[in-house]
């Protein structure tokens, strides 16, 4: 494993998931030493699922605790809460149903669904509600990165990349499901501790662009968190210059 204060490279996705699970617990413990609760925003998508499974396993085995955690989402697809593509469902399945987090401490972006409501209106209403519930400063934020260099649901060229005030916005993805709700650049910038997890060769070019590319957040939104602690498996780190 190679490690400097902002970059950890491990052999494979399983090791990366374990490193991030341990890191989240350490960061949370550090913030909880003088407070009863903290706000942790977690990434969606497929990569972090194993990390959340490992967190829940550690809690079930009595090796860890998420006591005091209020879990938020970095972004959400505007789909039914029970849809297979829902990030909130993935967190419910791994952390809540995995016995690590009470349902009341998981704060979902889309927690109700009226199929008769126009989706854009429903998304805007959910974004406004979420911004009001979100802590002004997140203690810990875990993000992923897409092969196109997006993070959260801030995609290349997104108007949301210009946002300087609002913490949560409706955004649009180039892939299904197109309608999203996402933390914005100010919300990412306000977080106390930011961790980015990426694994797989498909992310190698985006990771290089995010960490070592010419500054251009419009092209590579993940450059917004260039100074986060990045945890990569070897294939995702393969194009980084030494
Ligand atoms: C989402 C995520 C998104 C994710 C990247 C990588 O809703 O898809 O929050 O930002 O981190 O798209 O996704 P994978 O982990 O599935 O590659």
Image: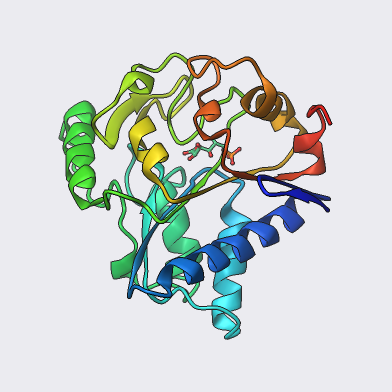
Q: Is residue 43 visible?
A: yes
Where does the C terminus fall, quadrant-wise?
Answer: top right
Q: Residue at x 60, y 74 (%)?
A: 57
Q: Is 39 above or below relative to 231?
A: below
Residue 173 in the figure: left or right of residue 50 = left
* 131 and 1: which is toward the camera: 1
Q: Residue at x 40, y 56 (%)?
A: 139
Residue 100 in the figure: left or right of residue 161 = right
Q: Is 122 above or below relative to 72?
A: above
Residue 146 in the figure: left or right of residue 162 = right
Residue 190 in the figure: left or right of residue 236 = left
* 72 and 112: which is toward the camera: 72
Q: How is the image coloured?
A: rainbow
- Location of residue 99 in the rendering, given as x and y in whole percent from the top left corner: 47, 76
- Location of residue 130 in the rendering, given as x and y in whole percent from the top left corner: 23, 46
- Location of residue 157 in the rendering, given as x and y in whole percent from the top left corner: 44, 13
Tell me which corner region of the image, top left, top right, bottom left or bottom right, holds residue 228: top right
Tell me which corner region of the image, top left, top right, bottom left or bottom right, holds residue 189: top left
Q: Is residue 181 visible?
A: no
- Location of residue 183 in the rendering, given as x and y in whole percent from the top left corner: 35, 37
Q: How many marks?
A: 0
Q: Is 220 above or below relative to 8?
A: above
* 139 and 123: which is toward the camera: 139
Q: Residue at x 75, y 36 (%)?
A: 236
């Amino acid at each position: 494993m190679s490690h400097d204060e902002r970059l950890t490279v491990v052999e494979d996705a399983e090791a990366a998931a374990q490193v991030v699970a341990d890191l989240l617990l350490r960061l949370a413990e550090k913030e909880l030493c003088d407070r009863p609760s903290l706000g942790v925003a977690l990434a969606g998508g497929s990569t972090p699922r194993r990390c959340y499974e490992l967190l829940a396993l550690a809690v079930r085995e009595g090796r860890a605790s998420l006591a005091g955690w209020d879990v938020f989402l970095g972004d959400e697809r505007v789909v039914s809460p029970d849809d297979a593509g829902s990030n909130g469902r993935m967190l419910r399945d791994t952390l809540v149903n995995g016995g690590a987090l009470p349902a009341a401490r998981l704060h979902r972006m889309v927690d109700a669904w009226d199929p008769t409501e126009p989706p854009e209106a429903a998304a805007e209403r959910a974004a406004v509600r979420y911004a009001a519930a979100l802590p002004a400063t997140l203690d810990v934020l875990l993000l992923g990165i897409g092969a196109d260099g997006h993070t959260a649901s801030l995609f290349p060229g997104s108007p949301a990349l210009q946002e300087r005030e609002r913490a949560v916005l409706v955004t649009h993805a180039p892939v299904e499901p197109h309608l999203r709700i996402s933390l914005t650049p100010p919300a990412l910038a306000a977080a106390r501790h930011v961790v980015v997890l990426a694994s797989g060769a498909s992310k190698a070019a985006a990771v290089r662009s995010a960490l070592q590319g010419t500054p251009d957040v419009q092209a590579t939104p993940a450059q917004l968190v260039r100074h986060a602690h990045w945890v990569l498996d070897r294939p995702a780190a393969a194009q980084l210059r030494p």
